[in-house]
Amino acid sequence: MTRSLMKYHLILLIKDPMLVIFGLGLPFAQMFLAANSPVGMVDYYVNTVERGMVSFMSIAAMVLCWGAGYNHSYSREIKFLRRLRMSPVKPVNYLVSGILLNLGVLLVFTAALTIVAVAIFDINIVDKNWVLVIAMLLLVFSMFYVLAMFVANALKKAKNSQSLSYVVFGGMIVAINLLFMENMPSFVHVIVRNTPITYATNVLQAAWVGTDLFHGHDFIGMIACIVILGVLSIKFFKYE
């Protein structure tokens, strides 16, 4: 059952090549553009790539989950999920199969990204705690996935849920950029500081550079998001 559902999720992913090209291809494009920089700028780009690895992984996880949620809304729209209602498939089976498929894609992407970064920029990855980095990446992915599933099921009409996904995930991309703007109103900073994308970036950064993972409330906030949104994504799961 799980294997068949994973195959279905893979078909949906392949049918949306723009997601793969822009969501997962952009970090590679940035690396290759940096590789063609003047010799005098090599050290600058090496440092930029190493600092950017966390952002690359976080954005890739978010884009994959965004696509998974969007495809779920599409499955509702074409009445595919209505047929599942008459089968032994439960909402948790559908969610788990989607997590496994997209997580596999993310891990392959992360491995390929790391190999390219080392081969071209010779960044140092030996001193990284990869067990911790991968563990935090799994949690980040889980948070984005249950968020995407909740958004995909939040509204009665599937089309409206697809539109809402653009607002939510597009808003997070804007939010993470607002965090670095000067003279930002304090209330905006508080809101941005407590968004899933900020939690994800800070937790992954702590794991990547080896600082205190539990400094601040990012890790606790991420776990709270996973639990709350996970429960809501199952509770509001819609077959059509």
Image (cartoon, rainbow, N blue to C red):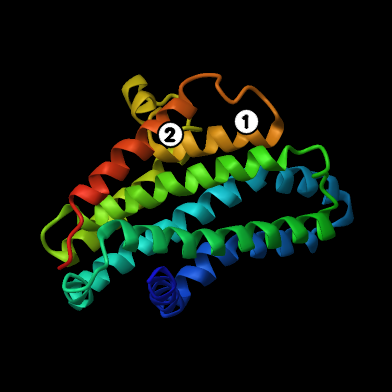
Name the disc covering residue 206, or none: 1
SS for callout 1? helix
Dot 1 amino acid type: Ala
Quarter of the figure that contains the C terminus: bottom left
User: In this picture, is 180 found above or below 104?
Assistant: above
Q: Are marks 2 and 1 in contact (CB under 8 Å)?
A: no
User: In this picture, is 228 found above or below 72?
Assistant: above
Q: Position of residue 32 (x, y in %)?
A: 73, 64
- Could you say which is closer to the camera, residue 66 or residue 97? 97
Dot 2 amino acid type: Met
For disc 2, the marked residue is: 222
Q: Is residue 214 visible?
A: yes
* Picture residue at 83% right of the left edge, 42% below the top: 126
Q: Quadrant of residue 76?
A: bottom left
Quarter of the figure that contains the N terminus: bottom left
Horizontal side of 50 relative to 167 (left or right) equals right
Horizontal side of 132 relative to 71 (left or right) equals right
